Every structure is written in C-alpha cells, then in structure tokens.
Amino acid sequence: MNGLKDLALRIGVAGMKILYAFLKLLPTTHKAVFLSRQANEPTLDIRLMTDYLAIRDPSLQTVCLCRRLQPNLSYVLYTLRQMYHLATSETAIIDGYCIPVSVLTHKKDLTVIQMWHAMGSMKCFGYAMIGKEEGNRAEVARILRMHKNYDYVLISSFDFLKDYEEGFRMDPRTVREIPLPRADLLTDRSLLQEKRHTMEEQYPRLQGKKNILYAPTFRKQSGKRDEEAIQTLVNAIDFDRYNLIYKPHPNSKLLITDPRVLTLRCPNLEALSIADAMISDYSSMIYEAGLAQVPVYLYAYDWEDYQGKRELNLDLAHDVPTLFTGDAQEIIRAIETDRFDREAFQAFTRRNVRIPATSCREELAKLILHQEEL
C-alpha cells in the first residue's frame, strides 16, 4: 500500500514540476504571498503583517492563500493558485510545511521565509519525528523534500537553534531571531486591557470573578480518560469565586458540556486578555501566556502516556518554573493561594521569546522587503 502511495506522490510532484516550468515564464511582480494551512482564513500573524506592510510599502501587493489540507480535487486547484503566486512573487512567507514551496525549483529572485506557527519550541517536529507515531515516513519526506528551499527560518530564541536544526535540517546561517508578529500585541499591556473590556462586554458572565483559562494541547486520540480528567478539573473549581473558560485546540473535537464552563473558540490573544490564570499541559501557548504575564499551571494527567506518543524539546517537569502535576485539586489550590513564581516564569519567557528592540513586525518586514541590512 505504501508503495502505491509513494508512486502517486512521485507522479503528482512530476506533474507539478512540468506545469511550474511554464508558470515561471510569467513576470515577477512586487508581491508577497502568504501561504498557510493552519486555518481557512488568514491567521492573526498574517493579518498583522499584511496590515503592517501596507503602511511600510504601499506599493507592495500582498496575497493570502490560507486553507487547511484536504485530499480532494478542490485542494488540487488551490495548489495551482499557490504555484502561480510563487512563480510571480518576490517573497513567500509560510507558517508550516507547504508542498509547492519545498518540491519545486523556484526563480532565483524568490525569497522564502519560514515563520513556524508555534511560539517558542515545545514539541519535536519535521525530521525529528521521522518514523515516529505522529511523524512521516522517511520515503514520504524524501519525495516531498520536506522543509527545503527556505532562505530564512524565524526562531523566537537562538536557544532553540538545535531543535530547529533537527526539525528543519536547514543551514543555521538562514536562522533569524524574530518571534511571531503576535508577540508585539501580547506584550502591549494597554491593548490587552482594551481587549479584556471588550471580552467582558461580549460575555457579561466573565465580570465580577477571576477567570481561569483551560487551554490543553491537541491530542489525536481523545477518549474517556481525557473526559474524566477534565471533569475532575471542573469539579475542583469553586464557581462562586471563579469562571472556567475552555479554549480547545483548533483541531480538537473534545467538548465540555458542563453549563458552568464557557467554551471560547477565539484567538489566543483574546483568550489571554481575559485570563487571570491559565491551566495548560504540553502546549507552546505557555510562552504566549508568559508574554501576557498570565500565571501558568500545567495539568499533566496523562504525562507518562503522552511522552510515549510525542517527543518534546523541553523537560516540562523540570525546565518550566511552575506547578506540574496530574492532580487537579492541587492546581486549583495553587491558583487560590497565588502559588506562582512570576519572576522565574518571566525569566523563562524572556529566554525563550526574545523581543527585538524595534518590533517583531518591523524585523520581519525587513526580510520581506529585502532590507535586512537596514
């Protein structure tokens, strides 16, 4: 079966290369194309950059092609649109693996920038996961030239350089220490306060109590154990004093049906603006919480099993300066007594997300506009 799939991939790549040879005959224009499969609409990072670039260089055309991967004919047509804009743009910005970016041979005047979608480094990815349960087969990675053709790779801190070298197998000289654009907003205290007021107006039940945000990582196979762990957490909360906000991962289908819990499928920025404390587990959202100065507690009820399924770049139990436990009641007691070392967690955040003197948007704009030396 794998042999047939690999053959189909080779045929598909060969067809793309033939078509792309003709598309490259089209003239290059002053254009930047953003390609993402994280969502079916531009992410906050992409929106921030297109808005910033419109001010920075009004003559630059920006195109956003954002769509989750789907194995159907419509996605094939969408891939053709990606190829057209790659052939006619000066710069391509991606936030994950993109098939046409990696498998095709591009014009010399196309600059490809990889701004990986996760803030900081948490889980192993790319080549570091080859042959693992949640990774690709080596032959698939070879056929699809996984993570090739990058001129620049953005990283939130050079402390993660080894992790990125293992995941991308790229030349370390291509790496630039520029966190994701949304870091600019997460460190803006006045903006966070404005968003909190907006959220309170939109959800009046969040007023008058402290808000605990529960934002777990995505689990491919959620089951009864997860449901029981969540219910244990819910039962540990004094709802006379606290609200519980559940922010599921965008890919998660795990629901909390308890009417006392408010489920919000909103951007991280909005969720963190309303949070007085955040409970997570193995999610890189902990770095964003650190930027927003929200106390973080790690609910690791399935730590032993999770380690066997997904390799991490951090030893969460020892490297993150916060409570790490599978005991829901202990976490709630820590929140109630404000047991959290803010100074240590801020130092942890600063090491892992290094905000530039200008702004993340400005430093990325320099790369997009080919002005890195300015």
Image (cartoon, rainbow, N blue to C red):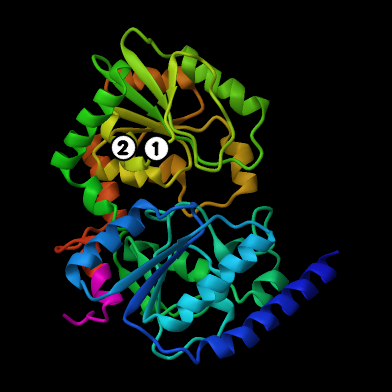
Q: Do the residues labelled 1 and 2 touch (CB within 8 Å)?
A: yes
Tag shown at residue 270: 2
Tell me: residue 236, above or below residue 345: above
Secondary structure found at label 1:
loop
- Looking at the image, which residue is at 70% across and 70% down? 140
- Left or right of 213 on screen, residue 339: left
Residue 286 image point, x, y percent:
37, 42
In the rendered image, the vertical position of residue 316 relative to residue 265, given as above or below:
below
Q: Name the residue under label 1.
A: 266
CA neighbours of label 2 inside 10 A, class few (<14), some (14 to 19), many (20+): some
Left or right: 246, with 211 as reference point = right
- Looking at the image, which residue is at 69% across and 83% down? 14
Q: What stretch is highlighted in magenta?
A: 364-374
Q: In this view, does 296 lie above or below 185?
A: above
Residue occupying the point 28% across, 42% down: 290
Foreground pick, 122 / 185: 185
- Residue 175 falls in image quadrant: bottom left
Tell me the element at label 2. Answer: helix
Q: Position of residue 17 (x, y in %)?
A: 63, 85
Q: In the image shown, does 100 or 210 lie closer to the viewer?
A: 100
Mark 1–mark 2 Cα distance, whole angstroms, equals 7 Å
To which quarter of the image does residue 228 belong?
A: top right
The crowd level at tag 1 (other Cα within 10 Å; few <14, some 14-19, many 20+) is few
**Where the C terminus falls, by quadrant?**
bottom left
Whether residue 72 sits left or right of residue 363 in the image: it is right
Residue extending farthest to the right is 1
Is 71 magenta? The answer is: no
Tell me the tag on residue 28: none
Q: Type of residue at label 1? A: Cys
- In which quadrant of the rendered image does the N terminus lie? bottom right
Look at label 2 and name its amino acid. Answer: Glu
